[in-house]
Amino acid sequence: MSRIGPGIEIGAQERTTEGAGDDPGARRMITDKIDAITRIPESHLITAPPAPKSVKIELTGSCNFRCGFCALRMREKQPTQPMSWGLFTRLTAEMREAGVEELGLFFLGESFTEPELLANAVKHAKYIREFPYVFLTTNGSLAEPEVVGKCMENGLDSLKFSINWASPEQFEEITGVKSKLYYDALNNVRECRRVRDEVEARTGRRCGLYASSIAYDGEQGERLRRVLNGFVRPYVDEHYMLPLYSMGSFATKREEELGFKPIAGNQGRLEALRDPLPCWSAFTEGHITSTGKLSACCFDAVGEFEMADLNEVSFMEGWHSEKFKALRQAHLAKDVAGTICEKCVAYK
């Protein structure tokens, strides 16, 4: 099978299928899980909620993209060191003991920049800590078949590709890198489907393959649809659309630069948007940076939303820190004026 490269005719391979997975239940799994996390249960609508069902832990803060809509652009300097293995193993033990069930091996960084660490982290999370669900999101450019296959064999339950570019030209404009990685990402989607099926046939384990995209309007949206139908949806179990998030207080600047209007906060996927207050990110999912900081925000690139230093306290001590409880109280009152969340939500 030939690789996708420059000069490709997108329309020649256009398909309308929503996914090639042959299990209807599996095709809905990722959106069911996402919706369950963004829907705050009554039990968690308190200032000191139980342990979150899901936590994203950042193996590395580095990313090989510089996407225009991503909060990582706010960092003056990118982290160069991955999370230490000792911190990772300690925190995963504490989280599992507290009742965390779903572990995402990423936060804002691109985990495939540390392939050996990633493969080992998957194996540790799945077979040592016994998390029921270990998942990962990637920009796809470094998700090469060999390392993806190892992660799947080591117990990865879900791999999702973020595909947010309608052409090589838009790719370069948005990501700030050369279009070669555009073709690498699309090729890797297809190749990872092949690898997934081979691993499943050999081991009986099935890793879900998914993709998400930002919903653009007009001509840009139509061009993206053609890319998705030709080179993404045929190879994944499910694809879903996202709004353009405000990335915290980054909203106004990004609207000016990109020409797309973000929504307030992180309201979830496009077909199941949540109210921005209270924000689910502070109640139902934990977010840990590669330096061991617990953040209240899934878009926190510069530590503005830091609630605790997990190098100093346990995961649950951080989850129930006084700082975190005070922020949650403001969310429950639906009045975040004067808090770090003010600019994000007020953007609405």
Image (tube, grey):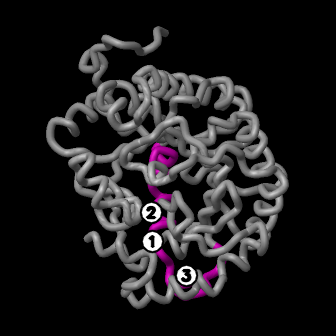
**Span highlighted in magenta in the image:** 24-51
- Label 2 environment density (alpha carbons within 10 Å; few <14, some 14–19, many ≥20): some
Residue on which disc 2 sits: 35
- Asked whether residue 198 is in view, the answer is yes
User: Which residue lies at the image location 40% right of the left edge and 13% below the top edge?
Assistant: 5
Q: Is residue 40 magenta?
A: yes
Label 2 amino acid?
Asp
Residues at discs 2 and 1 in contact (Cβ within 8 Å): yes
Residue reaching furthest top?
2
- Between 153 and 10, the one lying in front of the other is 10
Disc number placed over residue 39 in the picture, else none? 1
Disc number placed over residue 44 in the picture, else none? 3
- Between 280 and 134, the one lying in front of the other is 280
Tag 3 secondary structure: helix
Label 3 amino acid?
His
Decide if residue 113 is on the left or right side of residue 27.
right
- Label 3 environment density (alpha carbons within 10 Å; few <14, some 14–19, many ≥20): some
C-alpha span from label 3 to label 1: 10 Å
User: Which residue lies at the image location 46% right of the left edge and 25% below the top edge?
Assistant: 181
User: Which residue lies at the image location 45% right of the left edge and 49% below the top edge?
Assistant: 73
Mark 3 or mark 1, which has the lower sequence index?
A: 1
User: Residue 91: x percent and y percent?
Assistant: 77, 63
